[in-house]
Amino acid sequence: MAKITANQKPRQAKSPAVALSRDMRNIPATRYQLPNDGRKWRTLCDQRKQLADWLATFGDADGSRIFPAIETMLTAFDTWSRAKLFRRLAELRELGILKSEGLIRERGARIRRLIPDAVLLTAEVSDSPVSHTQPKSHIQ
């Protein structure tokens, strides 16, 4: 064991919550794709990833006890509307990444849980967008 001199402070262990942020950070944005995303799927995937990564900074190491209020989220994502924030939260729940577990108080913030394994277990989504063009008609 190394000796600590008078000028040095003992090294503190990193918070276990950092592990969740690190796990979420390593997930590619394409894993956040839903089948009905349409032609702007990359933007939607990036927004879902941004929100999931930001929520991960509030959670415990196992992904539990995430409870920032909606107003806090709107402050962090100041260019997003309230409706857009709720859509992205609903999409994360649809992907199975985010679970709601109740409220802190009767009118308090919602307690959420992130499940990064849900994204890792999903089928690999290709980087090529789905073609949404209509077939040409053979009627002249």
Image: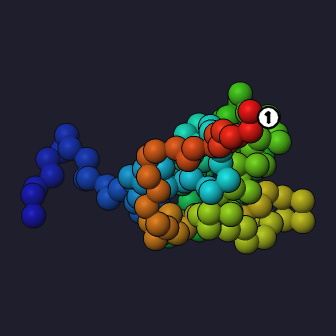
Observer-nearest residue: 105 or 56?
56
User: In which quadrant will I find the C terminus?
Assistant: top right
As drawn, which residue projects farthest toward the right? 106
Q: Residue 46 in the image: state x and y as whole percent.
A: 55, 41
Residue on which disc 1 sits: 81
Across and down, in percent, residue 126 comes to: 44, 52
23 is higher (above) or lower (below) than 85: below
Q: Which colour assignment does the render follow?
A: rainbow
Question: Is any part of residue 46 visible from this angle?
Answer: no
Residue projecting furthest to the top: 79
Tell me which residue sits at (71%, 27%) in the image: 79
* x 44%, y 46%: residue: 127
Residue 101 falls in image quadrant: bottom right
Q: Is residue 116 above or below residue 12?
A: below
Left or right of 123 in this view: 8: left
Q: Amino acid at mark 1?
A: Ser
Given residues 47 and 122, the one toward you in this image is 122
> Which of the image's four quarters has the N terminus?
bottom left
Residue 63 screen position, x and y as percent? 54, 66
Which is more toward the observer, 104 or 1?
104
